[in-house]
Structures are given as C-alpha cells and as structure tokens.
Image (cartoon, rainbow, N blue to C red):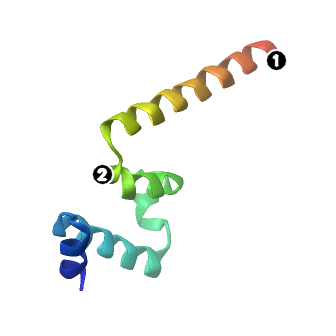
C-alpha cells in the first residue's frame, strides 16, 4: 500500500516506507526512540514534512525562526 501511495503522490517510495516505519515505532514505543537518538520529539512533525517544503519556504521558515531567537535574546537582556 505504501508503494501505491508513493506513486499516487509522486513521492519517493523509500521516503514513504521510512515514514511508515517511523510511525509504527512511534505507535509502539512513543517518543523514546527519538529521545535515545538525541532528537527532540517536538521537531518530528517538521522533519517528516521537510522534504515536501520548497527551498523558498524553507528559507522563510529559517528566517522566522531566527527572528524568534533574536526576539527572545533581546527580551532576556532587558530582563537582566
């Protein structure tokens, strides 16, 4: 079914199979495998869909993230 889905969506079938495997592991073990591998479970959503985002969209997301970090650092300096 994963192979048929990959053909319909025009996705790499190995990416689909990797996502299916990751989902099965998550269903069985929760976020423990991610934590063991040193990954933040909160970022899994972004990692799973990152390949579907365009280069321009990725740049926008990175810029927005950098803006958040700068704002938080500025706020921390003003509170100190």
What element does badge 1 sit on?
A: helix
Q: Earlier in the sequence, mark 2 or mark 1?
A: 2
Residue 61 makes an appearance in the image: yes
Residue at the (48%, 51%) spot, across then down: 43
What element does badge 2 sit on?
A: helix
Residue projecting furthest to the bottom: 1
Above or below residue 54? Residue 68 is above
From the image, which quarter does the C terminus lie in? top right
Residue 37 makes an appearance in the image: no
Above or below residue 4? Residue 68 is above
Residue projecting furthest to the right: 79
Q: CA distance from mark 2 to mark 1?
A: 39 Å
Callout 2–callout 1 Cβ contact below 8 Å? no
Q: Which residue is mark 2?
A: 51
Q: How many numbered circles does the render carry? A: 2
From the image, which quarter does the N terminus lie in? bottom left
Crowd class of label 1 (few under 14; some 14 to 19; many from 20; radius 10 Å): few
Above or below residue 7? Residue 72 is above
Say left or right for 39 vs 21: right
Crowd class of label 2 (few under 14; some 14 to 19; many from 20; radius 10 Å): few
Say left or right for 74 vs 45: right
Above or below residue 36? Residue 61 is above
Q: Which residue is mark 1?
A: 79
Say left or right for 39 vs 1: right
Q: Of residues 50 and 72, which is closer to you in this image? A: 50
Residue at the (30%, 51%) spot, across then down: 51
Q: Quadrant of residue 26?
A: bottom left
Tell me where residue 38 appears, x and y as whole percent. 41, 51
């Amino acid at each position: 079914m994963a192979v048929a889905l990959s053909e319909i969506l025009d996705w790499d079938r190995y990416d689909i199979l990797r996502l299916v495997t990751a989902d099965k592991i998550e269903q069985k073990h929760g976020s423990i495998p991610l934590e063991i591998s040193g990954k933040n479970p909160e970022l899994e959503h972004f990692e799973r869909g990152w390949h579907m985002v365009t280069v321009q969209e990725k740049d926008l997301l990175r810029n927005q993230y950098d803006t958040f970090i700068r704002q938080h650092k500025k706020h921390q300096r003003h509170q100190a």
